[in-house]
Image (tube, rainbow, N blue to C red):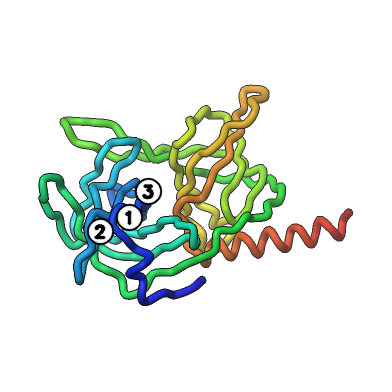
Amino acid sequence: MEKIKDYRNILQINTKINVGVSKGDYAGVYDSRIEDITQKHILISLPTMKGVPFPIKPGTEVDISFISNDGRFSFSSVVEGRVAEGIILLQIKKPEYIYRSELRKYFRVETRIKTKISKIFFDKQNGDVLVKMNSYEVMIKDISGGGVRIVSEVQFGEGDIFIFDLSEIFPGINEIFGSIVKEYSRLEKKFEYGVEFIMIKERDRDQIIKYVFKRQIENKKLS
């Protein structure tokens, strides 16, 4: 992963970004856009999930990521305030560095890992938007550094977002955000989905990639 200090030609106004929040009532991954860049701050549109805006509070730590033709970029920051310029914008601290990782296709291996996932959804009560989480047991049918295929007895929908806790298999990996990108065939009241990791620490991804590589070597020895 490349560390970039001069990112003026990379981070630009109108860039669409993902805003990840890992703690608090509004934990989740949201859509946003860079509206302006000043000497010390980046102004972004109010983050939304499925079109619903979420009032992320000042002081909240956020993980920003976006994709361009040059790769996948990310950095960590903190919300320092809100600015009203016709519309409400979030003011986040400008990072000292951003990080670039290459867009790559990930090898995957079959597995039979049972785990619990927490589904993030929202409802409206008293005019406010509240994030809630429900827990479900699923089986991971295959895994790669980019995502998993899961089998569930519960039906979900494309775009649904989950938090995966894989710490029983991968020590320390207890919070990966993933989104359903594909539904496969349904068999015997079971549902199969392709899930893409949309917020994952690079060291956690590397740990999964090492696991996949090790399993590939083991499978070749058995064949």
Instruction: Report the front residue among 6 and 221.
Output: 6
Q: Calculate the distance from the C-alpha at mark 3 to the C-alpha at mark 1.
A: 11 Å
Judging by the rendered image, the residue that carries numbered circle 1 is 23
- Is disc 3 in contact with disc 2, using a CB cutoff of under 8 Å? no
Q: Residue at x 62, y 55 (%)?
A: 105
Judging by the rendered image, the residue that carries numbered circle 2 is 60
Residue 98, placed above or below residue 218: below
Q: Is residue 147 left or right of residue 223?
A: left
Examine the image and state in which quarter residue 213 appears: bottom right
Instruction: Report the front residue among 33 and 82.
Output: 33
Of label 2 and label 1, which has the lower sequence position?
1
Question: Residue 188's spot in the image, x, y percent?
Answer: 67, 23
Q: Residue at x 68, y 52 (%)?
A: 108
> Which type of secondary structure does the marked residue at label 2 adopt?
loop
- Is disc 2 in contact with disc 1, using a CB cutoff of under 8 Å? yes
- The amino acid beneath tag 1 is Lys
Judging by the rendered image, the residue that carries numbered circle 3 is 29
Q: Calculate the distance from the C-alpha at mark 3 to the C-alpha at mark 2.
A: 13 Å
Q: Is residue 21 left or right of residue 219?
A: left
Question: Residue 131's spot in the image, x, y percent?
Answer: 30, 40
Image depth: mark 3 or mark 2 in front? 3
Q: Residue at x 41, y 74 (%)?
A: 4
Question: Residue 104's spot in the image, x, y percent?
Answer: 59, 58
Q: Residue furthest right?
A: 223
Mark 2: give few (<14), some (14-19) or many (20+) Cα within 10 Å: some
Of label 3 and label 2, which has the lower sequence position?
3
- The amino acid beneath tag 3 is Val
Mark 3: give few (<14), some (14-19) or many (20+) Cα within 10 Å: many
Mark 1: give few (<14), some (14-19) or many (20+) Cα within 10 Å: few
Of label 3 and label 1, which has the lower sequence position?
1
